[in-house]
Image: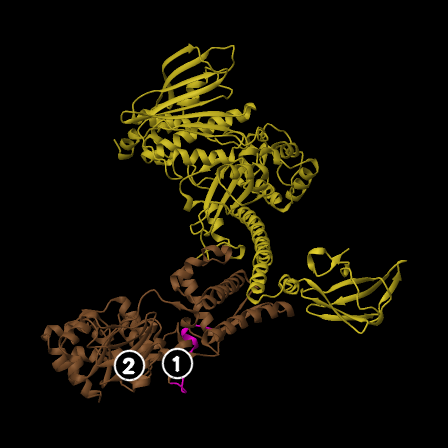
Chain colours: A brown, B yellow
Amino acid sequence: MEKTEITQKKLEGLAGDLYNQFEKGIVPHISLPSRTKANIEYSTKDDVWVYGDQETLRSVKTVRGAKTLLKTVYLSELLIKEHLKNNRGSTLREIYYISENWDIAKFHEQAESDRLIEDLEIVTALQREDFHVRPEEDGAAVFGPLKLQEKTRRGEKEIHCQEDVGEAGYQIPFNVDNVKFLSHDAKMVMAIETGGMYARLIENGFDEELNAILVHIKGQPARSTRRFIKKLNAELKLPVVVFTDGDPWSYRIFASIAYGAIKSAHLSEHLVTPTARFLGVQPSDIVDYNLSTDKLTDQDMQALRAELTDPRFNTPYWVKQIKLQMDLKKKAEQQAFAGKGLDFVTKKYLPERLTEMGII
Amino acid sequence: MEIAEELAKQQKAISVAEFFEKNRQILGFDSAPRALITCVKEAVDNSLDACEDAGILPDIFVQIKRNGDYYQVIVEDNGPGIVPEEIPRVFAKLLYGSRFHTLRQSRGQQGIGISAGVLYSQLTSGKPTKVISKIAPSRPARYCELMINTAKNEPEIIKEEDMDWERPRGTRVELEMEGSYVRSRRQSVFGSLKSAAIVNPHARITLVEPEGNIEVFERATEALPKKAYAIQPHPAGIELGELIKLLRYTDKKKLRVFLKETFSSIGTISAQELCSRAGLDPETSPTGLEHEEAKRLLAAFKQLKMKSPPVDCLSPIGEDLIKAGLEKEFRLDFIATMVRPVCVYSGNPFLVEVGLGFGGELEKESRVEILRFANRVPLVYQQGACAITHAVESVSWKNYSLGQPTGSGVPVGPAVLLVHIASTNIPFTSESKDAVADVPEILAEIDLGLKEVARKLRRYLSRQSVLSERREKEEIIRKILPRIAKKLSDILEKEEPDIGPVVAKIMGNLLVFRRKDAQNGLTNVQIEVENHSDLVRAFKLHEVLKQEAVAVSPAAKVVSLGDSYDYHWKLTLGPGESTTLSYTIHSDDTALGEPVVEGLDAEIVTGARVI
């Protein structure tokens, strides 16, 4: 069966369940895993974090529950009749605007429609790309010794991520399923938080020197970026290292790549790269390399404390690093290496760190 | 000369006017904004008292004007006026008045208020007070310019003449003084008049502010408050010294007559009873009583249960007018009121009235506003020192659905509290009449009144929450469920599902749900009956059929109606219980009417007609 057909059947199945509940005199409801930090657990099967057994019941017994179910059926109709049957798509934001005409089923803010789409992903065990729903922003950029093929509206294109692209690199499309890897000459994948560091490594020729595929993740990585990294890791069997700033928010970026995020734990198996490793900037680097730093703010301290209670950071390595940082009360940016000279990061820090990690 | 003799030369009497000249804070003239408020308040109180005595609906005009560094206060009323000879002493002699020696509820008591204003005015501006008063349309008005001779506490008349005045009767007083006009807070001329308007809904008060802005507090009723009559002191709580004084100066020759005539609530029988308890001869002369005997008499007062003092010495606002007053000045969702019975402290009858307004446009997160009144006069200052505040603070408001963050203190929430104490003698903490003293009897009565209105509030709020739950369910049923059903049928391209059974479950109704199944010339009918409520439901269920049914289970009573048959079952279902009724008809094309339920209200039944 074609993917579109499967998707349509699943959405209709959801509507059918609700219909049957009415017919049987059961108060219509949908049950969903509860999406909180307390209900995240480690799946030993896939080495990723997934939702636990706690469920929330959404029923028409309350006005809120009833309205959410009403919105759910309106949204299902849109996805079935507009998207799947006509082979069209909308962005998350467009869906929020489409609901303007839905009277009392209208979404009050985009966060509400985004959440409902995630709910539909969970209930149907599908992904939003299957519903032809795409995010506003594009995926991030890739630069490195990799040749791939992308299925576009203008046919299939072959692209080499060093030779056929500009200085900014290859842009990851929102549906990574349309990308096929052809060949590569890489030894590792390096995910980089900031544009500044990504450009620095390209300028210094780091991708050629160490055969690295550089992925600019642009802050908190979009789904397509995480899927792309996962795909590189799974299909090409390349090790993944994550290079971010040295502050609590950046550790969360790493966590979302390596362990998954609470919001998208239902998609962990598609998005998460459990073997990804944290390269730096580590709190211990601040001491070892005597980096220029900023003071931790109260919010930073709070975030560090929260991370100590987060199951994803409950490893000896992280506990040690986080506690060290709380003692130092300092944080460092990736750009702090520039203080030691423009080549310091590619000539000294990265080679040392990668050797220490056993990657080169 | 001995030192004592030397010192004795310096001893001399202090005039009361001199005393207050040096201690103006006692009278409420301690700050510039406050002096203005006190002055207006005293003049308005006098006007209201005068109108009440004369049975006139008060129409009071207040104007504050700026005059260089000074303020001019003008208060004019439509009251009975003051006879020309009395004008100087009423306005320019302290402790001169008509109310001090009677036991009757009135705003003014000691005869200090307005003369203190006159005193303050002459101290700060050096100008005399101007008074116009007229007692009848046919008589000329009298105009006076007055000052107080503080050494003697006697009026000094600067100017005195007859004049024409357009009013048929009334009084106008004009004072000039140092002051400061504030508007925004409750402690202001505006705020104090607004409060006065709440407890005097029969008065119209017009205020012209310095900038020319005009505020009219319109009257909410045309009915005058019930007139308060003067009474004798009540024996409960009277003190020994007071009793001895009364005994010594009475003109009555016999003790029993003295008792009956001097006190309220003592009749012939209780006078006899008191004498015998005290071991005194009822025929003896009261003036000759020994100290010891007076003590026994007082003890007898305490033993004997006396009836309450007569109510007519007090003039409560009444529940209706408290409500009208609150409605007039606030937008509210709910008002509860309570008038407590008359009680006595130290021989003085008093009565407490409480009003509570809730919701509307009141602030949800701030402390509740307390409007304090004594004998229809708003109390503006020293809220923290007042018995009313103390009583409010000691109620546990959390039990009555208002917030009280620290467990005691003034509650928090969208509410306003009004407490009025009416008494022949309000026990103020000081002469400026800002706060009522913590008299245990008064505290207890306020407490009871507050709890009574608080209980009413709690009942109202719990009723509201039941209603809002009901409204919530109705929204689900009327607006949301039908739309979900419609959309589902659109998506699946099927008929719209019957939402009846789900509605019954959500509403906690009795559900009657019938299925038909026709085959081989037979129609099998099943009726599911489910009780979704929390209560036992007993009722009859009727099926009216064109032909006789077979295999009726459980057995039903049948009544032939000529061309049809009425099958009915008597059913009792407990909470959550259900049952199935079934029968068969020899026909495969049976049009059935709606099932009928008898003995329940229509709104608690789904899926059947109710008779």
Label 1 Cα neighbours within 10 Å, binned few <14 / some 14-19 / many ≥20:
some
Disc 1 target residue: A269
| Magenta span contains residue A38 | yes
Q: Secondary structure at mark 2?
A: helix
Which residue lies under the disc numbered 2?
A318
Q: Where A6 falls versus B560 (above or below)?
A: below
Q: Position of residue B457 (x, y in %)?
A: 56, 50
Residue B315, quarter of picture:
top right
* B305 left or right of B582 in image: left
Between disc 1 and disc 2, the foreground one is: 1
The circle drawn on residue B37 is none
Visible residue check, residue B60: yes
Task: Give me the residue at 64% from left, 37% from top.
Answer: B265
The one nearer the camera, A326 or B3, is: A326
Left or right: where B1 falls relative to B407: left
Question: How many angstroms separate mark 1 from mark 2 (CA)?
Answer: 23 Å
Q: Position of residue B546 (x, y in %)?
A: 85, 62
Cβ atoms under marks 1 and 2 closer than 8 Å? no
Q: Earlier in the sequence, mark 1 or mark 2?
A: 1
Residue A316 locus on image (x, y percent): 29, 85
Quadrant for residue B335, please give it: top right
Identify which residue, B258 or A42, lies in the foreground: A42
Judged left or right of residue B552, residue B370 is left
Q: Residue at x 28, y 33 (%)?
A: B7
* Residue drawn at 39 percent across, 15 percent down: B144
Q: Chain of mark 1?
A: A
Q: Which residues are magenta?
A: A34-46
Judging depth in this view, the residue of A85 and A346 nearest the camera is A85
